[in-house]
Amino acid sequence: MWKVNEIFYSLQGEGCNTGTASVFIRLSGCNLHCDFCDTCHEPGTMMSLPDIVELVMQYPNAPLIVLTGGEPSLWIDEAFVMGLKQKTGKRIAIETNGTHPLPNGIDWVTLSPKTGLGGNGDVPVVLDCCDELKVVYLGQDLAQYDNITASYRYLQPCWVSDEKQCRLNMLATARAVMENPQWRLSLQTHRILGIQ
């Protein structure tokens, strides 16, 4: 059984898979408590794998399942990932803070480390390799991510409810990308579009 916060169908709004129709499985809970977290992920319902598959298959044309949270790596294992793949025929992506090892079978890893950022304590990142590295940019030193091997590197502005501060965050992130062109800009396009 897995504690699921929600399962929903939308477009991936961030990073390399932006615009891809996806079924999101948001698992409950996280081991970090970041001040800027924009997700109410603690509530949830205990669900079996067949129950999860049944909801996912309400969207048969979506090519991608995104495991997110909270922190999904706290709860999943290889049997869950392989069962989900076999029963749905979909690719599996995960969005993780990288503080726990990942099971085999995941097709796309988005690592978004939060170590050293407000409110999360000193939980170390244990992953050093991913498909895409997506960093919420708050002006931190980008050299701390040099030891992470990634096919793609994205800086993403920290989204806040204050529109003026949000705009300033976007401009600061754009400047950081121009000064560090090994990174790309990632915007939360689902927010811009007003979709989930």
Image (cartoon, grey):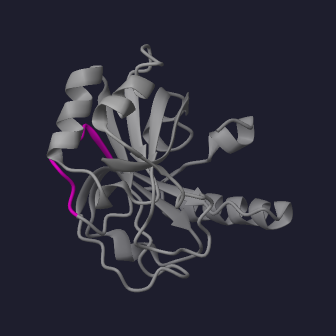
Evaluate whether residue 152 shows in this view: no
Quadrant position of residue 79: top left
Q: Is residue 111 left or right of residue 86?
A: right
- Name the residue at 37% across, 31% down: 51
- Name the residue at 82% across, 65% down: 162
Q: Is residue 101 left or right of residue 181?
A: left
The picture places residue 160, in percent across and down from the top left corner, at 72, 63
Evaluate whether residue 118 shows in this view: yes
Which of 182/140 is in front? Answer: 140
- Name the residue at 60% across, 76% down: 35
Give the answer, above or below, for where 37 lies relative to 57: below
The picture places residue 126, in percent across and down from the top left corner, at 23, 70
Give the answer, above or below, for where 63 lies relative to 125: above
Determine the main secondary structure of the stretch shown in magenta.
Answer: loop
- Name the residue at 68% across, 60% down: 159
Q: Residue furthest top?
A: 61
What span is colored magenta in the figure?
Answer: 101-109
Q: Is residue 194 left or right of residue 125?
A: right
Answer whether residue 2 is magenta in the image: no
The picture places residue 11, in percent across and down from the top left corner, at 56, 30
